[in-house]
Amino acid sequence: MDDFDTDEPTAADLAAIEIEEPLINAELEWLTAEITLLDAAERGRVNEMDARRVRRAEHAVIRETFALVARLTRSPSPSRAA
């Protein structure tokens, strides 16, 4: 069996995921908004709310990306501190 299949995430791995979680959630919201928009377009029922939802989700991804960069540059990550 491969080590990759049996190893659990380390504390540093979990900390990195936790730091990135707001961005991951924003990206998932963006994906959901895009899928909803594509589905509405396929059915011929796109409305302004669908477009707004995508724009808000895009802005959230941008905002969370900047916030993540700020967090990473302000404090050393567990992997950089070691």
Image (tube, helix red, strand yellow):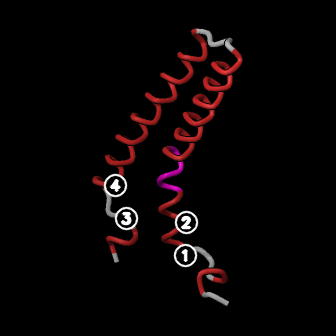
In the rendered image, the quadrant that contains the C terminus is bottom left
Image coordinates for residue 38, horizontal then vertical, percent: 62, 26
The amino acid type found where label 2 is placed reads: Leu
Q: Is residue 8 above or below residue 29?
A: below
Image coordinates for residue 56, horizontal then vertical, percent: 50, 23
The amino acid type found where label 4 is placed reads: Leu
Determine the residue positioned at 48% across, 52% down.
20
- Mark 3: which secondary structure? loop
* Location of mark 1 (residue): 10
Could you tell whether 9 is left or right of 12 in the image?
A: right
- Mark 2: which secondary structure? helix
Point out the tag, 3 or 1, that comes first from the N-terminus.
Answer: 1
Could you tell whether 63 is left or right of 36 in the image?
A: left
Q: Is residue 52 above or below residue 73?
A: above
Image coordinates for residue 44, horizontal then vertical, percent: 67, 13
* Location of mark 4 (residue): 72
* Location of mark 3 (residue): 77
- Mark 4: which secondary structure? helix
**Pointers 4 and 2 in contact (C-beta within 8 Å):** no
Q: CA distance from mark 4 to mark 3?
A: 7 Å
